[in-house]
Image: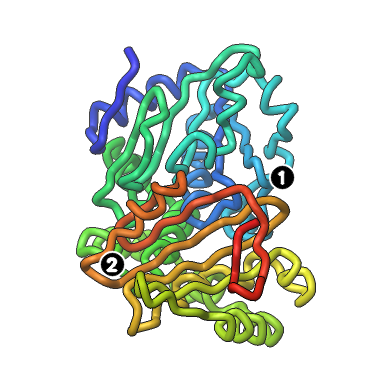
Amino acid sequence: MLLSTIFMFDHLAREIVARLKSASSVGLVFHFRPDPDSLGSGAALAAFLEAQGIPYFFYCISGVADDARLFDIDPTRVLSLTQMCTANLEIVCTFDAGDIKFAGLDWLMTSDNFRRKPLLINFDHHVTNTRYGDINVIDTECSSTTEVMYKFFKALDWKITKRVAQYLLAGILVDTDHFSNPATTSASLTVAADLLSHGAPLLQLRQFLFERRGLSALRFIGEVLSRLRKNPRYNLAVTYLTDEDIKNHGLNGEEIEGLSNILNLLGDVKAMLLLKGGKDIIRGSLRTTSPEVDVGRLAEVFGGGGHRKAAGFTVTGTLQNTERGLQVI
């Protein structure tokens, strides 16, 4: 029987574990350009599977960046697209992906590319998740998907190791912007405290996740700030960057992570939009601290999603500066 749920229940956790233990191999899928929440959730379940002797592999449509070293992602276990199709996986788990396209599985799961279509388990915390899994483990009250995984392990009465505590706390720290944004709740603080008691290294995580920007990165952030424009009609601040900008400044994705949260410090607008232009693809990141604004619903207009205070979307096109201002071509 296929199960779907919004909240975490003990019987659901046990049902999932029973299925995992009967599987010959499991695929753990990070979303496009994975952040520490997606990476930490997948790495935590990998540690659980390893402890149970269950074979597993990783997959990410955009590849896994250097951040993976914090999560002990074994590169020999990372599958290519071709390997993903031929690995004969019985179960595929996705982490922090609001829809199947963001998980990078849209064409894989809707065609005959798999030798056999695996059971799809969807772990997430986003309100806008489309419930695309055969089993959906979604708790929208959680600050992060790693907090969902924490509840999952607690429901199983599985002892969280120091290594797993590190993975889980990393996701919470990033999604709450170090306990400073509206995703922070009394529950997330309680979970974080418990993870610290299990040995999660808070100071080291903070340094790795938030304090690694070099001089070039700070100068580039200043350049992005100088591009800020205010749309008076919608009281929205907008700025942008491109992959070419990042390349020209000799930066990598890690050094500009969290830029949206920095821009969210603006106090005289209702919301902020950061556009990131790549080759024929534009990614939008929306943030707000206004109680009146739901950027998750705004992101849905463009085919994306997220939370009331933090959301994102991806559209096809190219960013171009014109006499009329920034336009999507």
Of label 1 and label 2, which has the lower sequence position?
A: 1
Q: Nearer the viewer, residue 178 or 132?
A: 132
Q: Amino acid at mark 2?
A: Pro
Q: Quadrant of residue 177?
A: bottom left
Q: Amino acid at mark 1?
A: Pro
Q: Residue at x 51, y 57 (%)?
A: 36
Task: State which quarter of the image contains the C terminus.
Answer: bottom right
Left or right? Give the position of 34 relative to 124: right
Q: Quadrant of residue 90?
A: top right
Q: Residue at x 69, y 51 (%)?
A: 280
Left or right? Give the position of 78 relative to 203: right
Q: Looking at the picture, does residue 222 appear above or below residue 316?
A: below
From the top left corner, tell me how far across and down residue 328 is, in percent.
Answer: 61, 59
From the top left corner, tell me how far across and down residue 70 is, in percent.
Answer: 59, 60
Q: Nearer the viewer, residue 170 or 299?
A: 299
Left or right? Give the position of 98 relative to 284: left
Q: Secondary structure at mark 2?
A: loop
Question: Marks 1 and 2: which is nearer the front?
Answer: 2
Q: Which residue is mark 2?
A: 182
Q: Residue at x 34, y 84 (%)?
A: 268
Q: Which residue is mark 1?
A: 75
Q: Secondary structure at mark 1?
A: helix
From the top left corner, tell me how far across and down residue 184 is, in percent.
Answer: 28, 65
- Packing grade of label 2 (10 A; few <14, some 14-19, many >=20) is some
From the top left corner, tell me how far across and down residue 153 is, in percent.
Answer: 34, 41
